[in-house]
Image: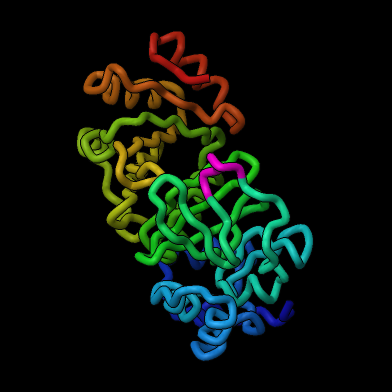
Amino acid sequence: MNQDRPSLDAFCGPLSGRVRSFFTRERVFRDASRTCSFERLAEELDRRGAPWFDKVFELEEDFGGLVRRGAHPKTPSLALGLFQLVCLGLDSPTEEEPADDSALISLKWPMARLTLTDNLLVHVGLHTMEGDLYMSEAGWMFWYIPSLDRVDLLSASALTFLERIALEDDVRREMREYAATFFVADEGPALAQALALPILEEASDMLVSHWMGPNILISRLPQASATGTCRTRIICRTVEDLLSASRFVAKKHPEARATVETHLPGGRERHEALRREGFAVNG
């Protein structure tokens, strides 16, 4: 890995102040040795028989080579760019045959197929030690977690993906207890309007929206297929604020069940508080 840490101006894509601060704080940089030209990427795709998705080329141009070091140089905790994955030796086909009901079916690398919609995806990065980033032909970013066999649709572009992870990092740093509560109910916009919360334009797109106040973050998140009912995610500084926001959702969607991230700080307390208040809670 190139030890020289270039300026953030090495990125072609527009970056907000929040993302730039996140990159500086987390030592995220662009490894110039793992960026490639259009010609080299085209040759690599031709050699592997992979389709040319314009958005994959745009990702390489704007953010290819982006990396955040992990515990080992070969296992970064964040990486973007198909060519970088080749350099990291992550272009070998999986040795295990996926089950017929797997959420993601691996094809000849870097291709995979999303079982739910049958869409083709391209492996374009890593996000945490848990999962891989995939991009659709439209440029939508998916996160596949093999240990859970789960696919999350994260954003409509690589840029708003970066904005989202920077936003969520800010929330984790600013809120001592940041476990999220999810409802399968499309009430994010109405709840944000009722609380007079401003939308975070830079982190929002056609698929995902975020609204934030001093003590609360509300998000409108899609299902993995982007065809089902959107989810409302609520992250609050206090249990009382969560209960108030949850009552708003339950009033319009009494059938909606809450799912709480009980493994994160404040999660167990929020899970029990919702149960005591009579909410239907999963888990």
| Rendered image quadrant of residue 269 | top right
- Is residue 24 among the parts visible in the rendering? no
Q: Is residue 220 above or below residue 14?
A: above
User: Whole-percent x and y of residue 56?
Assistant: 45, 73
Residue at (35% x, 44% y) in the render:
222
Q: Is residue 170 highlighted in magenta?
A: no
Seen in the image, is 183 located left or right of residue 147? left
Q: What residue lies at 57% left-to-right and 27% top-to-bottom? A: 262
100 is within the stretch colored magenta: yes
32 relative position to 188: left or right: right
> In the image, residue 250 lies at what x, y percent?
29, 20
The foreground one among 173 and 192 is 192
> Which percent across, then down, holds residue 102?
55, 43
For the stretch drawn in magenta, the main secondary structure is: loop
Which residue sits at x=54%, y=79%?
45
Q: Residue at x 57, y 22 (%)?
A: 268
Q: Which quadrant of the rendered structure holds the N terminus?
A: bottom right
